[in-house]
Image: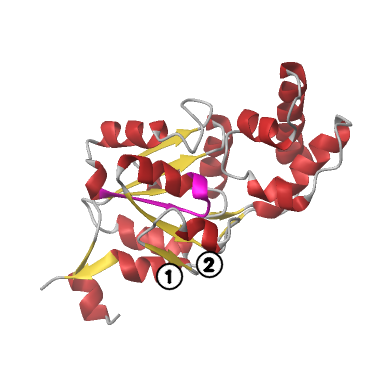
Amino acid sequence: MTDHMMALAVPRYRLVIFDWDGTLMDSEARIVGCLQAASRELEIGELSAAAARDIIGLGLPEAMERLFPGITESQGEALVAAYKRHFVAVDTTPLNFFPGVEAGLARLRAHPDQLLAVATGKSRRGLDRMFEHHACGDWFHASRTADVTRSKPHPLMLEELLAELNVEAHHALMVGDTEYDLEMARALGMHSVGVDYGVHSVPRLEACSPQRVVSHFDELMDWLYVPQQ
């Protein structure tokens, strides 16, 4: 897109809601490693990388229940605590934005009426830690985490974001790398876009009827903008 076209273009949606892990932040390796470390520490069993990858995006209690069926409530709580400890204090795997994310969000933020939000399976404390570490909290007008509302794929966190920002579902877009993200949107009749550089496969994303599936954040940005006639 030429500079002239970029100047005339406007985003397709009043509100764009992003998943965090696997969509904006390249955190898969750290999450998988910490889940495996937690399961070893509690001697609950060896956890495969594939199984750990599959639940990224869910709230931690829901993820543990899915990974370890039949665990007790106290075992689940211990797993969550161990995971958090490894993620914050033990594992040093770098956490960086995917290529194109910072420039793309800056481009969206340049439009004074554009709203941006985050809907994530992280905890509020975990997301705030990321906001602080990357100095990016003020990029977003609102956010929801799995510990303050229902976990994905229930659409409640999207419903709350729409209500807080006073936007109707047909003026909003959900962007995510898992079927959990896209199912939330589909439940509300909200448009969605899947990114295939995260954890779920293209067939799983396409089964949720997104507007499209993209392979790079720049591709999302090019599609988001509509040249003015």
Q: Earlier in the sequence, mark 2 or mark 1?
A: 2
| Three-letter code for the amino acid on which mark 1 is drawn | Asp
Near mark 2 (Cα within 10 A), the count class, few <14, some 14-19 or many ≥20, is some
Q: How many marks?
A: 2
Q: Secondary structure at mark 2?
A: loop
Q: Nearer the viewer, residue 105 or 199?
A: 199
Q: Quadrant of the C terminus?
A: bottom left
Q: Is residue 163 magenta?
A: no
**Would you name the residue on which mark 1 appears?**
218
Kind of residue indicated by mark 2? Pro
Question: Mark 2–mark 1 contact, CB under 8 Å?
Answer: yes
Q: Residue at x 79, y 40 (%)?
A: 90
User: Over which residues does the magenta segment extend?
Assistant: 172-180
Q: Is residue 72 left or right of residue 97?
A: right
Image location of residue 152, percent across then percent down: 50, 37
Q: CA distance from mark 2 to mark 1?
A: 8 Å
